[in-house]
Amino acid sequence: MQKTLPNRLVRASRWLPLVALGLLSLNEAHAQGLNYTPATATNVTGTYTDLGTNGTAITTANNDDANSAATPIGFTFNYNGAAFTNFVLNTNGLIRLGTAAPSAANMFGAFESGQPVGSGVDPIGSTNPADVNLLAPFNFDLEAGTAAGGAEYRVATTGTAPNRVCTIQWKNVRDKASTSAAAQFDSFNFQLKLYETTNNIEFVYGPTVAATTGADGVRFPTVGIKGSGSSTGQTVLANKTSSAAAWSTTVFITGEYAASTHNYRRSAPADLGRTYRFAPAVLPANDIAVNAIYSLGQVSSTYIPAHVVQALVTNNSATTKTNVQVTLTVAGANTVNSPVTIPTLASGASTLVSFPAYPLTTSGVNTLNVSVPNDDVASNNTKTFTQNVSTSRLAYTEDNPATTFAGSISVSLSAPFGGSLAVRFNTLTPTVVNSIKPTFTGAGTAGSTYRIDLVTAGGTGNTPSGTVLYSSPTLTRPTVAATPITSDVSVPNVAVPAGDFFVVFRELTGPLGLAYQSEDPLRPSTFYFQTSATGAWTLVNTTTLRTRIAVELALGPNTAKREELGAGLLNVFPNPAVDGKFTVSLPAIANERTAQVSLLNNLGQQVLTRSVQLNAAGTNAEVNVSSLAKGLYTLRVQAGSQMATKQVVVE
């Protein structure tokens, strides 16, 4: 599957499968798990009864993209760990529980090529804090249907306490045609039912009138419920992989949609009264789950002699648990047994556990195992991770043949390009980078080019916005078929400081298509993207993607001087500059005819650049810095794959 950023789904001539480590404190809690699961959802036959004039009509500004005012449920409905007495209806086939509206009126996933990028807000994929506690019986870009009377939205609460039912109805709506797909329904009716006490949810589907214009064809709505996010355990989605199949074939999944949603077409509408029922899970008395291990798949014993492993742990029990023991064991080349105690963990809450650093004394393969004591659910008590220890390699991807690449990730699949992906690395001692090995998968675009930068951390949050230590020449992405290909990009012994630094991949003339392994939830503070050269850096783990990017570094001792270039050394005179200028003296550089000379300020920003023609025996080039403020600058000279730097003072 190919994924792009920032859009969750690739737009093409047809629906495509999708896709486009900082240490946190032990007590940092994560979103509570949704108390509904695929196992407690059922697909049954039922009865559809139109509300008629019962209840109250819900007013909206229009029948296209609009949110209603807060509307009473009529009783207290418990969902996702909270109690609700109101909801807000969206005309596009969903509600948000509570008194606040979703983040936008155009709440629908624009998954077709005929729906412009940005025309809708995907309710499941959205990370906006307003897009939580959503119930979507049929979320699509909807408008008024063609039946007499126009579209209507209505609510009625019936029965007596404690067994009342709130029915919310969308009547005479239709799916809006796009430039690539015709409307499939001229009129469609459906209801959402909320049940008091049991807190059951039902989606019930009513009469459908097929459209008579355009072609019968597949379309992709969102059908399901969402808690606080889109990761596994936060959603329950109705999934129908074939648009021609009966609605009785729908199954339920958690997480996000992949190669299909609830595919539908006019020739296979819902049977009258078809009901999708979502029931709260009965939580076990004692269930602690290990959700993920965060470690390096390739780790250098030279530059990270002591390694910290983290694990995400969740309390799926009905009650708060105290003194929860979590144990890391390492077997293989190195051996460790390291228990950690979580003082308290609320029901439904998660926490990130950091184990004490352990020494990497021997090269070879380690098997990491994180476990919790036996409880009511044995299947989630342990996770394993394979790690390879060497003297010089770093990578996040797991070095295990059983952990395959799940797909590829790019910033853009079509022009304009210019976005970037970045991966944070950290070493305990200064080192040099000798090579960078990205892995590509998926069919590459012929002639697609990219560049690799090595960048220090900088700015707010230590993002990939510091000093550029190295820029590769323009590189050509390999064209790949079914087998992933790893490129070995030689780097001229570029020195990197101890601490954080980044490998940045910049798309130049085509999509990157970097391979990734699935990691859910994706580790924090590690993978970033930027949609343009001047755009802000965004953490990938704050999106819906779960992409552990495949890039490996080869490190070496910090023996080379940064002034080395070609057959000699980079030199500058006078230094400090005199009368607003200095001369750059370059040695002979074999097989190179030009060099790029740049000055960077102490924020890592490029403030001056020029191209210099090289002479075979060496070159002197005058640089005018009269327009620059006084201070310390980094002079960077790059000739082909060779790069040297030197500190320069402007007075």
Image (cartoon, helix red, strand yellow):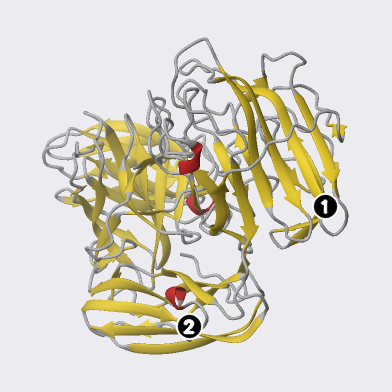
Residue at 84% in and 44% down = 157
**Of the two numbered discs 2 and 1 in the rendering, the one whose residue sits closer to the viewer:** 1
Which numbered tag is attached to residue 358?
A: none
Task: Give the image location of residue 88, x and y in percent.
Answer: 78, 40
> Amino acid type of disc 2?
Val
Bin the neighbour count of mark 2 within 10 Å (Cα to Cα): few under 14, some 14-19, many 20 and up.
Answer: many
In-front residue for pair 430/79: 79
Residue at 75% in and 17% down = 150
Residue 384 placement: quadrant:
bottom left
Residue at 22% in and 73% down = 390
Task: Give the image location of residue 70, x and y in percent.
Answer: 84, 41
* Quadrant into which the N terminus falls: top left
Residue 81 placement: quadrant:
bottom right
Asked if residue 222 can be seen in this view, the reply is yes
In-front residue for pair 504/473: 504
Query: Along the horizontal axis of the image, is 80 left or right of 85?
Result: left
Which numbered tag is attached to residue 164?
A: 1
Asked if residue 90 can be seen in this view, the reply is no
Q: Describe the element under mark 1 as helix, strand or loop.
A: loop
Query: Along the horizontal axis of the image, is 395 left or right of 8?
Result: left
Q: Is residue 23 above or below residue 625?
A: below
Task: Give the image location of residue 5, x and y in percent.
Answer: 46, 40
Q: Residue at label 2?
A: 372
Cα separation between marks 2 and 1: 41 Å
> Amino acid type of disc 1?
Arg
Bin the neighbour count of mark 1 within 10 Å (Cα to Cα): few under 14, some 14-19, many 20 and up.
Answer: some
